[in-house]
Image (spheres, rainbow, N blue to C red):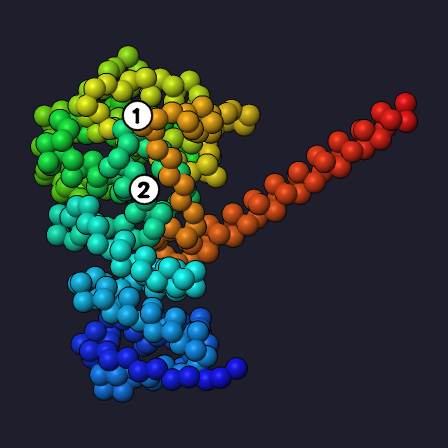
Amino acid sequence: MSITEMTLDFPSEYGTAVFGDYDRYLKKIERTFHVTIIARDSQLKLIGTELYVKRAHSVLLQLLELARRGNTITEQNVDYALAMTMEDKEDVLLAVDEDTIARTIQGKPIKPKTLGQKQYVDTIREKMIVFGIGPAGTGKTYLAMAMAIQAFKNNEVGRIILTRPAIEAGEKLGFLPGDLQSKVDPYLRPLYDALYQIMGPESFLHNTEKGLIEVAPLAYMRGRTLDNAYIILDEAQNTTPAQMKMFLTRIGFGSKVIITGDQSQKDLPQGTQSGLDVAIRVLDKVEDIGFCYMTSQDVVRHPLVQKIVKAYEDYESRINKDERKRQRAGYERDNRTNRRR
């Protein structure tokens, strides 16, 4: 296997951003592609097999362009660039970065960071109702909130309605003190956090007082018709089929609906069917309804979260495979018993 060398002009002012603290991003690229990268002045020399040198060269160019655009390079950016390059999708990272949805109160741009997130955002733009389905950390709720706030600011809708079922995550909290609002606020806290970050507390409170932004438990939606609104149902895996049907039939004219959920994190009582699972089967072929499925590759939290999600996905896949084998073996055993009779 022949060894090749390649040089890359690399402006020194972007070195710290692209290489990471103590060159940890650079070392990760070297380990992934089994190449050696030597930095001298404003040049990088890459040494290794031809294929992997080209791939390392491509990753470095992508990260350099991200830095030039003013982005802060994170480990997630590096991991995603490596993964896409290994799949010969070198241009994905830069294409995704071109789409700015909104800006936070501090002026930081909110953009999709993976191909799955980009497809999710594009589907929201095209469809009236969108189901965003995927594991924790894939930005389902945050991107939906950003799209809703931007549409509200552009006067595309008259109000924003955010809702989620009030179900404890596997715990019984018992009696909670305070009035009704203080009892339901803990369930809706993730929605408040995103609103504060994107819109700012003052703007949020002002619009809430005017009734233009509403954050409420799903139970409050019954009997209403929601016209000219951007409606987000979060944690939809914790709805019952009846609740999901109730919610979907609230939608009025001029409204946009986003439903987010993680099928692997249900908090419903044992034996209760998830409204999200039923809706996916029932509405799969309905026009103007989009379904976006994100995976562990779209996780944009700490890299360890991506590994945890992937480990659980693999574990659940093995469990399901073993269960199918047991069912098949039982079916064959029953057939043999019936033939003997």
Quadrant assignment, res 63: bottom left
Residue 143 on image: x %, y %: 26, 43
**Circles 2, 1 touching at the beta carbon (< 8 Å):** no
Residue 86 on image: x %, y %: 43, 64
Q: Quadrant of the C terminus?
A: top right
Identify the amino acid type marked 2: Tyr
Identify the amino acid type marked 1: Pro
For the residue labelled by badge 2, is the local secondary structure a helix, a strand or a loop?
helix
- Which label sits on residue 120? 2
- Which label sits on residue 93? none
Q: Residue at x 63, y 43 (%)?
A: 321
- Which label sits on residue 217? 1
- Which residue occupies the foreground of this view, 84 or 265? 84
Q: Is residue 214 visible?
A: no
- Which residue occupies the foreground of this view, 260 or 56? 56
Q: Residue at x 35, y 33 (%)?
A: 290
Q: Is residue 339 visible?
A: yes
Vertical placement of 46 versus 102: above or below?
below
